[in-house]
Image (cartoon, rainbow, N blue to C red):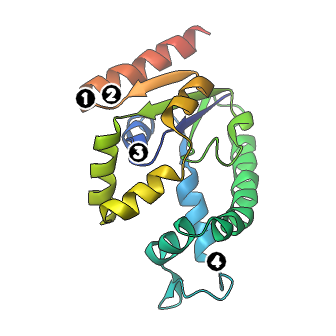
């Protein structure tokens, strides 16, 4: 089985790559896995990050992106659970040719060693900022804090096996995904 991570900085277009691949292959999303564990939290160090008894991700995001110590504490809770879930997923799919996992914080969480290949989805900073503000209803300042919390694309490019540039249209994106698949089937 070839374990392939799909990563990219926030609002780069990873979900478009996931959607395309999921028509053919098993595709998992560590954000969804993490959200499941977030919803199981009953308390977060006494901070008010709950609305009607459920985790309010917008409140939590504001808190942890402005407080690196709390961000580390949250990651210490969530990352081990995500890693264990990934290992279970890999075991479940051990007879498949490919398995794809979207891991937005692949390098930040130290999960890159779990994968055989890494696809990095990139886009220009201006586009990412606009997408993020629109998608998450954030101010420019809030969006920039989230963008700056991740390792730069330049650093991630050095650590990735295949780069997909998402500055164009969906057709161009699909061409690049198919190039990756063709190269991987030839390996």
Q: Which residue is mark 3?
A: 15
* 78 and 71: which is toward the camera: 71
Kindly tell me whether residue 144 is visible in this rendering.
Answer: yes
The vertical placement of 45 against 176, above or below, is below
Q: Residues within 10 Å of mark 2 (few under 14, many from 20)?
A: many
User: Dot 3: few (<14), some (14–19), or many (≥20) neighbours within 10 Å?
Assistant: some
> Which residue is at the front of the view, 120 or 24?
120
| Image quadrant where residue 106 sits | top right
Cα separation, mark 1 vs mark 4, equals 38 Å
Which numbered dot is residue 122? Answer: none
Q: Quadrant of the C terminus?
A: top right
Element under label 1?
A: loop
Answer with left or right where residue 160 lies relative to residue 78: left
Of tags 3 and 1, the one toward the viewer is 1
Marks 1 and 2 in Cβ contact (< 8 Å): yes
Q: Residue at x 73, y 37 (%)?
A: 114
- How far apart marks 3 and 1 lie (CA) works out to 15 Å
Tell me which numbered mark, 1 or 2, is placed earlier along the sequence: 1
Q: Is residue 24 visible?
A: no
Q: Quadrant of the N terminus?
A: top right
Q: Earlier in the sequence, mark 4 or mark 2?
A: 4
Answer few, some or many: residues within 10 Å of disc 1's Cα (few below 14, many 20 plus, some between 14 and 19): few
Secondary element type, mark 4: loop
Mark closer to the chain start, 3 or 2: 3
User: Which of the two marks, 1 or 4, is nearer to us in this view?
Assistant: 1
Residue drawn at point x = 58 percent, y = 52 percent: 30
Q: Which residue is mark 4?
A: 40
Q: CA distance from mark 4 to mark 2?
A: 36 Å
The residue labelled by disc 2 is 173
| Residue tagged 1 | 168
Q: CA distance from mark 3 to mark 4?
A: 24 Å
């Amino acid at each position: 089985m070839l374990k392939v991570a799909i990563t990219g900085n926030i609002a780069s277009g990873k979900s478009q790559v996931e959607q395309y691949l999921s028509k053919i292959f098993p595709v998992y999303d560590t954000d969804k896995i993490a959200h499941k564990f977030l919803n199981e939290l009953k308390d977060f160090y006494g901070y008010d990050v709950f609305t009607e008894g459920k985790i309010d991700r917008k409140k939590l995001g504001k808190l942890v992106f402005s407080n690196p110590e709390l961000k580390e504490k949250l990651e210490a809770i969530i990352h081990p659970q995500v890693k264990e879930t990934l290992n279970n997923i890999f075991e479940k799919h051990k007879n498949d040719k490919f398995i794809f996992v979207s891991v937005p914080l692949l390098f930040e969480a130290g999960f890159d060693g779990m994968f055989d290949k890494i696809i990095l989805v990139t886009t220009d900073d201006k586009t990412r900022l606009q997408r993020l503000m629109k998608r998450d209803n954030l101010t420019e300042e809030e969006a920039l804090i989230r963008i700056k919390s991740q390792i730069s694309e330049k650093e991630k490019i050095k650590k990735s096996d295949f780069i997909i540039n998402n500055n164009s249209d969906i057709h161009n994106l699909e061409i690049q995904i198919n190039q990756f698949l063709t190269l991987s089937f030839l390996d």
